[in-house]
Image (cartoon, rainbow, N blue to C red):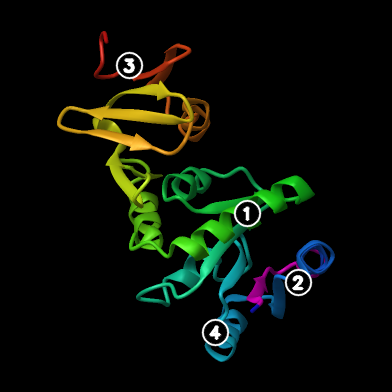
Amino acid sequence: MKIKAIIVDDELSARNLIETLCKQIYDDKIEIVEQCSSVPSALESIKKKSPDLVFLDIQMPGENGFDLLSYFDTIPFEIIFTTAYKEHALQAIKNSALDYLIKPIHIPDFKTAISKLDLALEKKDSLDRYQLLKENRENQSSGKQRIALASKTGFDVIQLNEILFCKSEGPYTDIYTKDHKYCATKSLKEICELLESEKNFLKVHRSYLINARICQKI
């Protein structure tokens, strides 16, 4: 059965590009059931079509992409955010284990996003990543961001300012806090990329990333 998808973007050219990519690369996997140019039209379409996936532009006139999510108590579909700006909100999206595409959209990035979507649809984990996104956006200036990291059994949600250091373990990374050790199914390189905007984290060795604010030595 194909994945039913809706595209929400105020720019017709952006909507058409995503639909074209889906048809050219994933015609046997993804069916675009509707294009929407605003939050009100997207709400109506979601209600009628019950999509599995929404490609959601962040910046739109009137209500934006995050406003759309506020209409739902729980989000019954997967989301791939799209944006023309490397805005501050992208870190909150990354920390919440969600995906996004920077415009102009490049085919390798598009394929990566769809491959992650496959894993998300298969896993159907219990983590409410959209509630976590809401919390992270609200806490961006307070230093109380939490990060969701995939593990072998699901997701671990960790307070960023409680991380002492991260240690490479081959394709995985052990993450240490004062009270716990977590094993993330990401390499240290991927963890470094995820935390690149967090100025407190420094890579001091090929195998170690430390929180310089609280970790003086390992």
In what element is the residue under mark 2? loop
Q: Tell whether 100 sits left or right of 35.
A: left
CB under 8 Å between discs 4 and 2 = no
Q: Which residue is mark 4?
A: 50
Three-letter code, disc 3: Ala
Mark 3 to mark 4 CA distance (whole Å): 46 Å
Name the mark nearer the viewer: 4 or 2: 2
CB under 8 Å between discs 3 and 4 = no
36 shown above or below 162: below
Three-letter code, disc 4: Ser
Position in image of residue 196 (x %, y %): 50, 29
Three-letter code, disc 2: Asp
> Residue 212 has which mark?
3
* Circle 2 Cα neighbour tier, 10 Å, few/some/many (<14 / 14–19 / ≥20): few
* Depth order, front residue of 106/190: 190
Q: Which residue is mark 2?
A: 28
* Circle 1 Cα neighbour tier, 10 Å, few/some/many (<14 / 14–19 / ≥20): few
Give the mark nearest the N terminus, 1 or 2.
Answer: 2
Q: Residue 11 in magenta?
A: yes
* Circle 4 Cα neighbour tier, 10 Å, few/some/many (<14 / 14–19 / ≥20): some
147 shown above or below 164: below
Q: Tell whether 36 sits left or right of 152.
A: right
Q: Magenta part of the protein: which range? A: 2-15
Give the mark nearest the N terminus, 3 or 4.
Answer: 4
143 shown above or below 123: above
CB under 8 Å between discs 3 and 1 = no
> Residue 152 has which mark?
none
> Residue 115 has which mark?
1
Give the mark nearest the N terminus, 3 or 1.
Answer: 1
Name the mark nearer the viewer: 2 or 3: 2
Name the outermost residue toward the left: 179
The residue lying at 64 percent from left, 79 percent from top is 1
